[in-house]
Image (cartoon, helix red, strand yellow):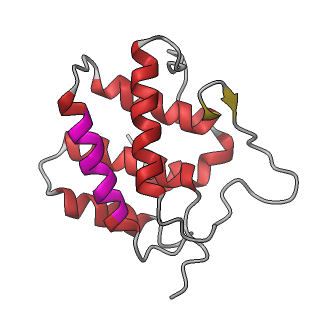
Amino acid sequence: MAANNTPPQYVFEIVAIEAIKKFLAVDVPPEEVAKFFAALMAEQYDTDDLAADILALLEKILTFINSVEISDIDLLLESYIFFICNYEKIGMKRNKKPMFRSILKGQALDKTRVYKASKSFVAYAYGMRSEVSPLKPDIWTVADEIEFAPIFEVIRPPVNP
């Protein structure tokens, strides 16, 4: 299958960060977590290489996290999701309402997406240390990200009481 409808880079990063959060929260092999999150995206995107790429990014980010001193991993991961949703890169806001297409429209497969995501995460983490990267506001939730709602509804289904 031609991979012409793969998740945009920022959607890939959001899904991968959610996979990392899930992996840290439950006792499940990382391969299964990656396959689970890739399967969640199957309705919207081509997922041929998605599980392998999520797994590769999971390994790279966890290796980085283990190599530096991070006091609050949950805050870092949640703030990075806020950053991905709202910024292209440090200091550059994301245009969430493109004129001619949806922000969630699939794209051709970028074989460097794991590399790009890992470098972006490392830059963000070091930016947080030097107080350049934006930290998520205390009142921010993923529900505030209306443009990304179709993604968050799938990867963070609402919990019914």
Query: Which residue: 57% across, 36% down?
Result: 143
Image position, residue 91 (x, y; %): 65, 24
Query: Which residue: 70% across, 31% down?
Result: 93
Farthest right residue in view: 99
Whether residue 31 is visible, yes or no, is: yes
Residue 2 versus residue 130 in the image, above or below: below
Whether residue 157 is visible, yes or no, is: no
Q: State the extent of the magenta-drawn residues as a range.
A: 53-64
Image position, residue 52 (x, y; %): 32, 67
Q: How many discs appear? A: 0
Q: In this view, does 66 lie to the left or right of 45?
A: left
Q: Nearer the viewer, residue 89 or 22?
A: 89
Q: Which of 158 and 145 is in front in this view?
A: 145
Residue 3 versus residue 33 in the image, above or below: below
Image position, residue 79 (x, y; %): 46, 27
Query: Which residue: 52% across, 29% down?
Result: 141
Asked if the magenta segment contains residue 56, the reply would be yes
